[in-house]
Image (cartoon, grey):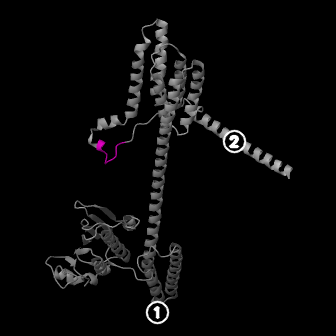
Amino acid sequence: MTQTTAGTSTTGSSASVPDTGAGASGALSGLRQDLFTGAFAARPLPPLPEAGPSSVLRRLPSGIRQGLRWTPHWLLGAGAALAFLGMTPGAVGGGPQETLFLLSMCLLLAVPLVLVLSRPVGAFWISLVAFVATSLIGGDPPWEGGMGPLCHLIVMVVVVLRTRPRTAPEMWLLTVGPIAVLSALTHAVGSLSFFTLFSAVVLVAAAAGRAWREERRHLVETETVTAHERARRTLLEERAVIARELHDVVAHHMSVIAIQAEAAPFRVKDTPPELAGAFTTIRENAVAALTELRRILGLVRAEGAEGFHGDPEAPQPTLSDLGTLLEGVREAGLETEAVITGAPRTFPQGVELSAYRLVQEALSNAVRHSPGARARVELSYVLGGLGLRVVNDGPRRPVAPSPGSGHGLLGMRERVQLLGGEMTAGATEDGGFEVAAFLPAAPDAPSPALGGTREREGGSAALGGGKTTQGEGNAAWGEGAA
């Protein structure tokens, strides 16, 4: 029993030794990497970043703003000059050799304040050598009174701020070691002990500031990457929604092709075999295309239909359904007015679907972000396509936090780019928002749902409420769809 206990104790003791050795080895490796490897390598300090758009510095002239970007360089350069000039009077007055030596030591103390801007670790070593050398000189040197220790402390603080937090204890230990030896030899415990304690407090504060800055920079980078990934995911989701919607449009046309190709031979008496074979080939290709479309739709619907607008099995909306959309928006509390310019007509189904979704998203944003506001929807039927504009004024009630992802405009731009159109969106002067887009397309036929010939002949008619307005080629929705 006793032997087992002893063996266990010996094993545990031997197991703890490698851990201590590994920690010491890691500390020495970090010290070598921080203060020895490439100690005099050039690491110039860049100027401060440009002032942001909301900064008060933007009010200053451009030359002054550019000069302020070099503030750390000016401060350290001025500090080095003042330190040298402050120690110079005490260095002169003796013999030539003594004066030259003292001036050299003063210069050696001041130069690292400038050198730390380009070679921070090398400046620390030069400052450390100068600090130890000047501490060995007895009598009444020109750096007496704290100028030498102050210069060395400033250099260490700048090195910590420019490199990494762990250099603070490393430099402090390298500085305290010679100080302890000097204290034992010269019995000057008071001033050196004060410097040891004061420098420890200052370096800890500098290391904490550097660590906080690194953590903040890492947080900003993480948030930036997260925002990019969120935008990319939203873009892919919106593209999947568009693909699901356009599938119905393409599938409808392919189905018509297949049916007409199958029925065409029976409409012609004594159909030539070559013609019947051609129609059969057309039908087979159309059916094959429909099969491939269903497979693709299965892929984009693999994650479900959570991003789909409404019922996935329902027919896709067109511009003729805008009246119903406006009624729903009015019931949600958004006072909406809609105006048509030009002769209403039918466009390809993809164009009408995209136009409907643009208006739907713009009005949804107005309901969420401008409660109690008024909105205006404008449709312009022109020769080359369809122009639309949705504008709302500022909110009249407090805006509640919106749980949305904030990428509705991204999906709108995707729809417009898919059709080769153009879109602009931005805030208005009265605090509202405006979305304008143009969708190029060739019209299919006049649209009876939007007025047709009656609109062109009768001028402007309201699509609800039973009232008419004067004008030519201009139709406005009132309380519902005609």
Q: Does the magenta stretch include residue 305?
A: no
Instruction: Residue 306 in the image: state x and y as whole percent.
Output: 46, 74
For disc 2, the neighbor class at 10 Å (few under 14, some 14 to 19, many from 20) is few
* Front-lying residue, 293 or 274: 293
Label 1 close to label 2 by CB (< 8 Å): no
Instruction: Residue 481 in the image: state x and y as whole percent.
Output: 26, 83
Residue identified by numbered label 1: 266
Instruction: Tell me what residue is drawn at x 52 percent, y 78 percent.
Output: 294
Instruction: Residue 440 in the image: state x and y as whole percent.
Output: 32, 69
Report the amino acid beneath label 2.
Answer: Thr
Task: Kindly report the secondary structure that dominates the magenta region of the rendered protein.
Answer: loop
User: Of discs 1 and 2, which sits in the foreground?
Assistant: 2
Instruction: Tell me what residue is drawn at x 50 percent, y 87 percent.
Output: 276
For the question of whether residue 83 can be seen, the reply is: yes
Residue identified by numbered label 2: 20
- In the image, residue 27 sits, relative to residue 464, either above or below, namely above
Q: Is mark 1 on a helix, strand or loop?
A: helix
Q: Give the range drawn in magenta.
A: 50-57
Would you identify the image quadrant in which residue 477 lies? Answer: bottom left
* Front-lying residue, 84 or 387: 84
Total marks placed: 2
Instruction: Tell me what residue is drawn at x 28 percent, y 83 percent.
Output: 449
Furthest residue toward left: 470
Report the amino acid beneath label 1.
Answer: Phe
Instruction: Tell me what residue is drawn at x 58 percent, y 21 percent.
Output: 182
For the question of whether residue 126 can be seen, the reply is: no
